[in-house]
Amino acid sequence: MVVETLERSCEGSKRRHVNGGDVAVPCSGDEFSNGDINAAPGVSAKRARVSREMTFEDIYGADALLNDDDEEEDDCDWEPVQAPVEFVNWCCVNCTMSNPGDMVHCYICGEHKESGILRHGYFASPFFKDTGLIEVEEKYGGSSSATISTAVGFDERMLLHSEFEVKAHPHPERPDRLRAIAASLATAGVFPGRCLPINAREITKQELQMVHTSEHVDAVNTTSQLLYSYFTSDTYANEYSARAARLAAGLCADLATEIFTGRVKNGFALVRPPGHHAGIRHAMGFCLHNNAAVAALVAQAAGAKKVLIVDWDVHHGNGTQEIFEQNKSVLYISLHRHEGGHFYPGTGAADEVGTNGGEGYCVNVPWSCGGVGDKDYIFAFQHVVLPIASAFSPDFVIISAGFDAARGDPLGCCDVTPAGYSRMTQMLGDLCGGKMLVILEGGYNLRSISASATAVIKVLLGEIPENNLPIAATPSREGLQTILDVLNIQMKFWPSLAISYSKLLSEWEARLIENKKNQMRRKLVRVPTWWKWGRKKLLYKFLSARMISRSK
């Protein structure tokens, strides 16, 4: 592990994901300026000096300065021209995208430049300036108990982990992510209020070494001696990052113990830095320590024999897969954009199933394109995730809950809604008596992650989500093809998938036949368009109507 020191950190402010991932372009600091205007022949030196200080609009409107009269003018009432208005670009607090200074709303997500999202979470209006306190009328569903509750792990010291160098374009993994979620939960009266807080502690080196090498742990700890450093071009650390990472892992470990031993029913780890890209001996992808892996092994130390990790972050959790790919007691299922390895981090193909006796215990659902939404995810849960999870029969469930597949996320570019996340949480809640820990991973649109995290926690509290999602979801064509590929590979290890594969294969073939018919219909001879305006106008209408009726 190599930690780049201060000198290396002063390189340019561009950050890029490898293999076609996110590209963060710094905000332009350019101001609108006016060049020098050369005086026209015959204009006095005094007038030339004045015109050089003026804008084009001023010059065009100043007839007195640009006339042909060379007589000396009375300038006793002359006043200096006011400096032009300067528009400074601003970056959206919600999605971090750069906007021209004269705009009030973000041209990407529509958020007001002075939105109250950090004070009130997603309850704040995206269209207006923050005007003060918001009252939210909450409708509680389900029942609560004094002995069975939902725990939330959070510590403000994790907010100190931030990019040291102030850049024009904020890093997407920023402290405001936790602030927005915490503000949403507080405004909704969920936390503090209805959830049990867990006291944070820093995880020990011995506990981290269950997952990472001692060299990796030492490399992360070394960053506390530096003002700032970088593990990769997009994975930063400052002097507080090592402690934040230890607090995050410690909260996940303690939540896993509390849940598995029955002291609480379930829990949500509101932590950062995220962890699922951190491997055995490396930090990458904004991640320092692998929080989900730590929680899984701590749960096993507390007595869990089999642990299920479901990772719905839009990026593949290559670190988690590396840690458990030879372990049959931990089943890792990931749903992510892959696009043939061209989406960050490039791993997670459907044929990556585990190694050295762990075959079948890594399940990857690699979407082939962006824009994947609720129906594709729920369909994958119904036909891949839940059948394999039920056959595995876990004692403990961990969700690596990245919300960067959410609608509006600038990196994920997918279309999952809070209703979709709540439905997936609800579907996993029936496993192992509801012993489930949700750990925050990615998600970089503040409005999306705060709404989605709040929806998930409400499900953990026992509320029944109100949404219009159909029980039997119909996937997109690309989604169905991906799921068929996964089933074809995984049914070698999970025979119960064979029936579902045969049924879906028939549906896929029917779709192909229908597509061929549609292509043939499109190849039919069309009525000449120019008939529409000529003497054959009535014939055009008659034939067009017949062709439309036949194509249905």
Image (tube, rainbow, N blue to C red):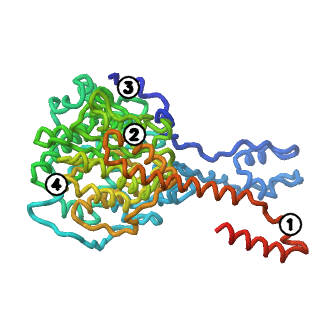
Tell me: residue 35, above or below residue 233: below
The 10 Å Cα crowd at callout 4, few under 14, some 14 to 19, many 20 or more, is some
Tell me: residue 409, above or below residue 26: below
The 10 Å Cα crowd at callout 3, few under 14, some 14 to 19, many 20 or more, is few
First of labels 3, 4 by sequence position: 3
Q: Secondary structure at mark 4?
A: strand
* Label 3 vs label 2, nearer the camera: 2
Q: Kindly report the distance in space between the C-alpha atoms of the residues bearing marks 1 and 2.
A: 54 Å
Q: Residue placed at 34% from the left, 22% from the top?
A: 2
In the rendered structure, which amino acid carries the disc numbered 1? Trp
Q: Is residue 283 left or right of residue 149?
A: right
First of labels 1, 2 by sequence position: 2
Q: Which residue is nearer to you in this view: 401 or 269?
A: 401
Q: Which residue is nearer to you in this view: 330 or 448?
A: 330
Q: Kindly report the distance in space between the C-alpha atoms of the residues bearing marks 1 and 3.
A: 71 Å
Mark number, residue 489: 2
First of labels 2, 4 by sequence position: 4
In the rendered structure, which amino acid carries the disc numbered 4? Pro
Q: Secondary structure at mark 1?
A: helix
Residue for badge 4: 197
First of labels 1, 3 by sequence position: 3
